Image (tube, rainbow, N blue to C red):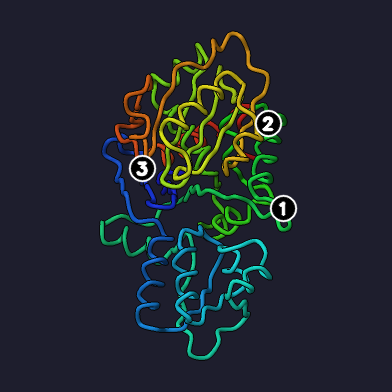
Amino acid sequence: MVKSILCLDIGSGTQDVLYWQEDLVLENCPKFVLPAPARRVMARLRELTAAGQAVYLHGTNMGGGFYRAAMAHVKAGLPLAAHPDAAYSLADDLGQLEKLGVAVREERPAGHVPVPLADYDPGFWQALLGAAGLPMPELVLACAQDHGFHPGSSNRIGRFNLWRQFLIEAAGRPAWLLFRKPPPELTRLAALQRAIGGGPVADTGAAAVLGALYDPGVARTAADEGVCLVNAGNSHVIAFLLYAGRMYGVYEHHTGLRSAEELWRDLTLFRRGELTMEAVFDSQGHGCLTLPLPAAAKGFVPTFVIGPQRRLFEGRAVSFPAPGGDMMLAGALGLLKAWQDRQSGDNKLE
């Protein structure tokens, strides 16, 4: 029986963390909201750009939230090289990346300052937890957004092909979005899983939905009538239609590309099953997919919004749940809920 779990929700702005311990009530479990790993890389790159230093990125595939800092380094006329494993954090097509000015090299070029890339650094967590008087956990669960590896094609389309497969083949059961082994296209999650020691991983959007369902009121409403669950993240807005334990639709767009009015209009059409993949894709979003919507879901009218950009929905007919008493912990709680749900029955994590 696992008695301690580190649950990590790794976003573009923050990583939100729950250190769950079996012998503590949830309210007493340690919690952290820390800068995302990509922000630390971004800060280091900016330091080295200001110092006029050449840089070598190494390590693993991770979130690309430092992309603009990397391109600013190149634009400043400074050398930037990357190991192939690390280079995939910036692009699927390494040939195209080299055309942008990033040299892909197996070995660090002379004079280049090494900058490590990783969504999960065991040394960081050992130091942080140790300073807090906490032992390393028995299990690490983690989630991150993974666009997927789709060379030669749009990763937005590729990502939605994976959603379609899930909604149809896994019958839209949310707990099944916690992967013992992620699909091969999800290379970032695969790298993350190796780093955490092989524990289950999930996409941040899926974890947020599961976290919202950690709230008893949300769970009851979703069981009785259809609901729309929205995670307004710093980089992406993702929404799901849920009813009676099943997901019937998914919508995803870039937070910075939609106004509050445009988001609300999108969600209104989404709840009706009238928003098309093409409409979202053409507006530079990831996409939209809905299955036939059951009449018993009554239009998926109740809307619950979580996430650091939930202010975009202020003044609308929505509710702002705080799963476990802290909205920022929704993803971490979602990981915990999925892991607990998949320990037995049809959801067993095999």
Quadrant position of the C terminus in the picture: top right
**SS label for mark 1:** loop
The one of 171 and 200 positioned closer to us in this rendering: 171
Mark 1 / mark 2, whichever is N-terminal: 1
The residue singled out by tag 3 in the image is 21
Instruction: Say which residue appears at 65% left-offset and 40% top-offset.
Output: 160
Q: Amino acid at mark 3?
A: Gln
Q: Position of residue 100 (x, y in %)?
A: 59, 71
- Residue 47's place in the image compared with 68, above or below, is below
Q: Amino acid at mark 2?
A: Ala
The residue singled out by tag 2 in the image is 170
Residue 153, disc = 1
Mark 3 / mark 1, whichever is N-terminal: 3
Tell me the CA gap for discs 1 and 2.
25 Å
> Quick one: label 1, few (<14), some, or many (20+) residues within 10 Å?
few
Instruction: Say which residue appears at 45% left-offset and 42% top-offset.
Output: 255
